[in-house]
Image: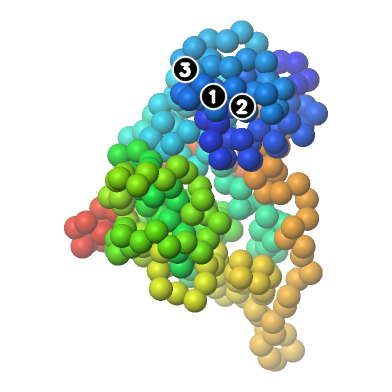
Amino acid sequence: MSDKLRVAVIGCGGMGTHVHLPSYSEMKNVEIVAVCDIVRAKAEKAAAAFNVPNVFEDYKELIKMDGLDAVDICTPNYLHSIIAVAALEAGLHVFCEKPDAINTVEAQKMKDAAEKSGKTLMVMRNNRYMPISGYLKQYIDEGNMGDIYATRCGWIRRRGIPGKGGWFTTKEQSGGGPLIDLGVHMIDLTMWLMGNPTPVAVSGATYSKFNDTDTSDSVHSSFGEKKADGTFDVEDLATGFIRFDNGASMQIEFSWASNIEAEDRFFELRGSKSGASWHSLDDKLKIFTEAQGRTVDYLPNVNNNAGPGHHKANLMHFVDVVLNGKEPMFIPQQGLNMVKILEAIYKSAETGREIQL
């Protein structure tokens, strides 16, 4: 391999053109050699914007391209595993937008293909790269929190349904609503901070109460392409409870629409030595512990907007893993565990029972 990673981006929608392509274009060790989208006009527009020499409509033709090292998948969810497996079998490294896949069967195929090919498979886990995440991870790894035994996380919106009527709200293409769309982010971050324990059981409930409203107060509702006469057969709120093999537990809540005060992303960790929390509403990491015989609150001075941005940092890490052999912060087993959790929560919501993993 040369000193540059030759990448093709598949899917020229919002994430592809506003996040992945701009990020790669700023990396001196990356060459964007092709873009692909089933709507050729989108691919041509992206190619013109980022000076990309090759345009494809069919990923099957793209992965046959000479001189290609890796593909970056930014398509609707149901295509993630299909394209990833094909690319890995073609001998290419793969970076994929979250979620890993829409069910465990497909996630397992991705993991198996990566192991058989010996190529890198990485899925977007951008919240691990927030400055507050790195600070807290080091704090935890140094033993300052003790045994982390109970956690809580979520991403809740007041009115923020993305691409209503399009693939986001069509279960066959998305795999679900806010649980699979937003849950990956905060469940993964919280599990990573906990040391990636293995999930063993989940219970959950889902609700769909806002499929008749077009009201929006969130920038996130602009994601995707809306269809006035489209499908809305997914949840708009999911709650749940996860048990892990080390005895720890996690409460979760994810919504696209709820009658709440404001949109918020958050995590809370409770450890035997100290606790920690972060809410996007004020974007401050807070640590709670004891000192000199009394309870004490710490507010570490961490600028969460420092650095290249957490999406770009995740992509930079992928490039570093492939080009320089950096130890990956994400492995496919973590992706499989995530999809097992999501799938089981949906099953629990349907059956009304706790699901063993």
User: At label 3, which amino acid type do we have?
Assistant: Asp
Residue 45 is marked as: 2
Instruction: Give the residue furthest to the top.
Output: 66
Residue 36 at what x, y percent from top left?
A: 54, 22
- Asked which secondary structure carries label 3, the reply is loop
Q: Is residue 161 above or below residue 331?
A: below
- How busy is the neighbourhood of tag 3: few (under 14 within 10 Å), some, or many (20 plus)? some
Q: Quadrant of residue 173?
A: top left
Instruction: Indicate the amino acid at tag 2.
Output: Lys
Q: Which mark is residue 41?
A: 1
Between 214 and 262, the one lying in front of the other is 214
Q: Which kind of residue does numbered mark 1 sit on?
A: Ala
Q: Residues within 10 Å of mark 2 (few under 14, many from 20)?
A: some
In front: mark 3 or mark 1? 1
Q: Position of residue 350 (x, y in %)?
A: 21, 56
Report if residue 94 is visible in the image.
no
Q: Which corner quadrant of the image does residue 345 belong to?
A: bottom left
Where is residue 232 shown, x and y percent of the image? 30, 50
Per the image, label 1 sits on a secondary structure element best described as helix
Compared to residue 345, the image places residue 80 above or below, namely above
Which one is earlier in the sequence, the residue at label 3 or at label 1?
Answer: 1
Q: Residue at coordinates 52% horizontally, 54% vertically from top-left?
A: 220
Query: How far separated are the C-alphas under marks 3 and 2?
Result: 16 Å
Q: Where residue 141 sits: x, y (%)?
A: 67, 59
* Side of 162 relative to 193 (left or right): left
Residue 346 visible at all = yes
Residues at marks 1 and 2 touching, judged by CB atoms closer than 8 Å:
yes
Point 33% across, 35% down: residue = 105
- Residue that appears at 52% across and 57% down: 186
Labelled pair 3, 1 in contact (Cβ < 8 Å): no
Identify the residue under disc 3. Answer: 58
Kindly report which numbered mark, 3 or 2, lies closer to the viewer in this rendering.
Answer: 2
